[in-house]
Amino acid sequence: MLRFKSVLGSIFISLLFFGFFCSSAYSTTLWIEEGQLMGAYDLEVNGEYFDVEFVDDSAYNIFFNTLTSKYEFLFTTSELASAASQALLDYVFIDIPAGGLYDTYPSLTNGIDNTPIYACFAITPYQYSTFDINGYIISEEISYRVAVNSQNESQDTIVDGLSFWPLGLTPQVDLTGNASTVYAIWSESTHHQPPVPAPTTILLLGSGLLTLVGLNRKKFNKA
């Protein structure tokens, strides 16, 4: 019975390693064009997967123009927008071995001025609403979280943002003239595939299990 439990334990440990190899196969893919960081594919936020694009434009053109807009606010709470912003800092604004120093040099992000810029402010909107006092609607607002990718890594952070405009006026919040700020536009991932273990991983797992069973059988025969 003890030997049988030992075999089961060994199999369980092997399956844990198998699960580790499967999960580690997943990774975010950066979207890079001519050295510029345009966005990323397959980025996990609270267990779901998204694509993100850095856009240098006005809120009206991106979200509210009924003829051209193709985006929506996928994150509808401050907590989700904060999680998305943190994912940008952890998995997108990074230095990669191929030479893209997107953490060290924020100016390499699309929409950021090419001259030395010491921080990139990536805005993730999460709420659009009207604002009223005593029952009278007086203005409208966009709420958002900002992922701050600073050249000084210790200053990377997430900050709150809120933009107001008088009721009835077109919400611009135009960033085209802002050298250090872009919108982080999110969409449901079209690239995500469940991680598939490599054939070598499966082969190693099978060989390991057979070896464990063989060793325990050998001990049993000797006994």
Image: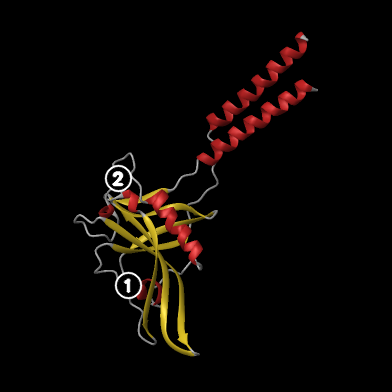
Residue drawn at (40%, 54%) of the image: 88
| Pick the front one: 190 or 45 | 45
Q: Secondary structure at mark 1?
A: loop
Residue under circle 1? Answer: 58
Q: Give the image location of residue 207, x and y in percent.
A: 61, 23
Give above or below for 147 relative to 209: below
| Pick the front one: 114 or 51 | 114
Residue under circle 2? Answer: 100
Residue drawn at (33%, 39%) of the image: 97
Whichever of callouts 2 and 1 sits on the residue coming sooner in the sequence is: 1
Q: Quadrant of residue 159?
A: bottom left
Q: Amino acid at mark 1?
A: Ser
Give above or below for 159 relative to 166: above
Q: Give the image location of residue 220, x and y in percent.
A: 76, 14
Query: How are the colours assigned in the image?
Result: secondary structure
Q: Give the image location of residue 165, x and y in percent.
A: 36, 82
